[in-house]
Amino acid sequence: MNEIDLDKIDMMGSPPEHEPERQYYFMAKCREWVREFEQKNGRYPLACIQTFGCQMNAKDSEKLSGILTTIGYVVTDTEKADFVLYNTCTVRENANTRVYGRIGYLGRIKRKENPGMKIALCGCMMQEEHVVAKIQHSYPFVDLIFGTHNIYKLAELLYRQINAGGMVVEIEQESREIVEELPSELKYGFKAGVNIMYGCNNFCSYCIVPYVRGRERSRRAVDIIQEMEELAKNGVTEVMLLGQNVNSYGKTLETPVSFAELLQRAEQVEGIRRIRFMTPHPKDLSDELIDVMAKSKKICHHLHLPVQSGSSRILKLMNRHYTKEDYLALVGRIRAAMPDVALTTDIIVGFPGETEEDFMETMDLVARVRYHSAYTFLYSPRGGTPAAAMDGQVLEEIAKERYDRLIGRIRAISQELAGEDTGKTAEVLVEEINAQREGFVTGRLENNLLVHFPGNEKLLGKYVRVKLLECMGFYYMGAPV
Ligand code: 5AD
Ligand code: SF4
């Protein structure tokens, strides 16, 4: 993607001021270092990126991987590498705890096996001051820390670290500019995420995202479409349009474009067969969007529509700007327009002040909507968010007991729903060789469910019609037809 000949870059002069030229200059500089490494060690250095959290982070990791590959690193899955980068998430506390444990483990490998190893941390967790302070104090062997607003600068920061030694820390509070046109290494050759906007302005009272990802910024529609065309040329057939709240796409652009309009333009891109998006906010999912989805041949009939709670009282405390009734009415409109739509959601259990009555409203909503699947989370207080300071924090054992009841109900419903398509024939995009079952591959249905069926690597990235033979809860066993 965006291949540039680093050999043509003048490295004698001072670094260019403008992006992305500046980063290509530093990539070329780092590549000199990589070549020296190769001469000394008889091999190219290995780099490992571990990604925590959401699709945004996964997308950022593809960009980071693209930069490292351009520099000359060989990307590997194992952490016994010469450069290990953790792209972190801080949406819930347990994500943070896991990262600290893993940094300690990396430190031991570095001490005992590879003193030249470089350890880098980036992503949402690093946007929190107390996290950076803790790492500086307790994990001094970390080499590089950067945040969510400057991932495009990896080469420049790495170059600085190589020359200066010690720990390089660069965190920005806001993005000064959106820097694109850098290399990107796709995890799959046939499907890709495309950022359409960055940041979030919603300030749901429990959520740390607006504080670590900054204010909403949309990319220009022409740039998004151009990226899709480029991807299609390179063999990508499925795209996932990414944003924290895709419904507010385009509002701040010089010439505003609605998300529904953007989808209609995306639909015109030749070679793209499936379009998905994440995440819409129920408060402003327009009828225009429902209409565009219903008429489209490419937009998958799957909506991930986070509800968070079924209690209107709690929704108000969460600052969600809709009631239980609003949400149910919206689901009604969506289903009327697309009877075959698969709905999934996110739910938080144990938000401050949640009573048994509130929780029963969530149980009731789940039974009425009938989700194909749902991600359920125990509320986790995040420092600096309004909810963390609210009265009535729910005891952990009460929250856990509610959580278990909710999962039970969700599971029962998704099993009933999934089974409904047994016996039908449907198209899947084959994504992976099945690791558990020899001679099987795994494909994804339009509605996001997985199907395992007999096949080999020749099918990867292909669209195959399969008969859905048996439903195993969250996936089907099938046979090609
Ligand atoms: N505690 C628990 N879950 C949370 N989420 C966001 N913030 C929190 C929190 N503080 C969940 C929401 C969101 C999903 C990505 O993570 O359900 O939709
Ligand atoms: Fe967080 Fe709400 Fe923004 Fe989603 S919409 S990222 S839950 S503030």
Image: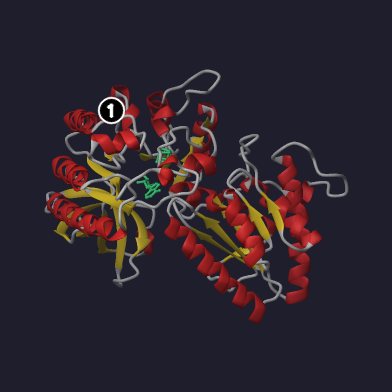
Outermost residue toward the bottom? 112
Residue 468 appearing in the image: yes
**Which residue lies at the image location 29% right of the left edge and 33% below the top edge?**
297
Where residue 183 sits in the image (x, y, percent)? 61, 48
Where residue 368 sits in the image (x, y, percent)? 14, 40
Q: Which corner quadrant of the image does residue 174 belong to? A: top right
Outermost residue toward the front? 391
Residue 113 appearing in the image: no
**Which residue lies at the image location 32% right of the left edge and 47% below the top edge?**
392
Where residue 358 sits in the image (x, y, percent)? 21, 43
Q: Is residue 339 left or right of residue 464?
A: left
Q: Is residue 180 left or right of residue 9?
A: left
Residue toward you, 99 or 403: 403
The relative height of residue 468 versus residue 343 in the rendered view (above or below) is: below
**Which residue lies at the image location 45% right of the left edge and 53% below the top edge?**
53
Q: Which residue is mark 1?
A: 290
Q: Which corner quadrant of the image does residue 342 belong to? A: top left
Give, as a three-letter code, the residue at label 1: Ile
Where residue 264 sits in the image (x, y, percent)? 38, 26
Q: Secondary structure at mark 1?
A: helix
The relative height of residue 168 versus residue 153 in the rendered view (above or below) is: below
Outermost residue toward the right? 12
